[in-house]
Amino acid sequence: MENVTFLNHPLLQHKISMLRDENTGTNEFRKLVEEIAMLIGYEALRDLPTEDVEIKTPIETCLTPMITGKKLAIVPILRAGLGMVNGILALVPSAKVGHIGLYRDPDTHDPHEYYCKLPAPIEQRTIVVVDPMLATGGSACDAVNMIKEHGGKTIKFMSIIAAPEGLNRLHDEHPDVQIYVGHLDRCLNEHAYICPGLGDAGDRIFGTK
Ligand code: PRP
Ligand code: URA
């Protein structure tokens, strides 16, 4: 599938398996989400533009590449996306952070917007939308629509676990968005939860139920 990258590194897959385990508690779960976000982010950001700058080493002066352009925007979809932000900030500490608030209606599974704040000038930034779960794809598609309405152009989407339904929908509705997925799971169940998945990501990160 064009514009979709699956991360199949054994270290990443090992961490995702630990995340799925129902015996993994809140503290460990949070740490794993952060580490996995950093590993996916490392791959997702491999095309960041660089320019050669002059640096003086203790030996001599050289031209050497550094990240250039407007600062990256990391945009978590609340709540669960928040768990991924620090992992990416570990890679790009100067990134700006926007927020999009969406929750799924438990009956219709449709997303409802309750917050949107993006760093300006959003049209000049590479925007990385993060959400651990891509289930029906409703939240991801709405978030990307909102960013585009605000002028965002270069958009990447990172999820830890995706269902085929959500991945296909995001890819079809936004073929211009680069998608990075930690693991593609089997399907959705009747409550639109990912199988086998990891349960409710927000509840597991924040210890709610
Ligand atoms: C979860 C998850 C995604 C969304 C995915 O959030 O974090 O945002 O569901 O489902 P979808 O692909 O079918 O839209 P939820 O709505 O449970 O909110 P929360 O993060 O506040 O718990
Ligand atoms: N949201 C979650 O947190 N988990 C799922 O499996 C689906 C949506």
Image (spheres, rainbow, N blue to C red):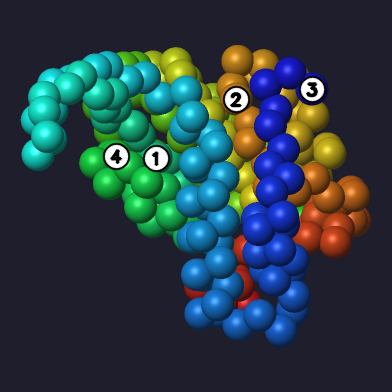
Q: Secondary structure at mark 3?
A: loop
Are the residues flagged by discs 2 and 3 in contact, CB closer than 8 Å? no
Which residue type does callout 2 highlight? Gln
Residue name at image x 11 percent, y 28 percent: 60
Q: Tell me the residue that label 4 is attached to.
A: 95
Question: Mark 4 packing: few (<14 Cα in 10 Å), some, or many (20+)?
Answer: some
Residue name at image x 27 percent, y 17 percent: 51
Residue name at image x 46 percent, y 19 percent: 154
Q: Quadrant of residue 190?
A: bottom right
- How far is mark 4 from mark 1, CA to CA? 7 Å
Which residue type does callout 1 highlight? Ile
Q: Secondary structure at mark 4?
A: loop
| Left-right relation of 117 to 104 | left
Is residue 200 in sight in this rendering?
no
Which residue lies most toward the front here? 59
Disc 3: residue Cβ within 8 A of ligand 1's nearest atom: no
Disc 1: residue Cβ within 8 A of ligand 1's nearest atom: no
Which residue type does callout 3 highlight? Met
- How far is mark 1 from mark 3, CA to CA? 24 Å
Residue name at image x 73 percent, y 45 percent: 8
Q: Is residue 159 above or below residue 175?
A: below
Question: Mark 2 packing: few (<14 Cα in 10 Å), some, or many (20+)?
Answer: some
Q: Tell me the residue that label 1 is attached to.
A: 74
| Left-right relation of 66 to 111 | left
Q: Which mark is residue 178?
A: 2
Q: Tell me the residue that label 3 is attached to.
A: 1
Q: Is residue 108 above or below residue 47?
A: below
- Lower sequence index among marks 2 and 4: 4
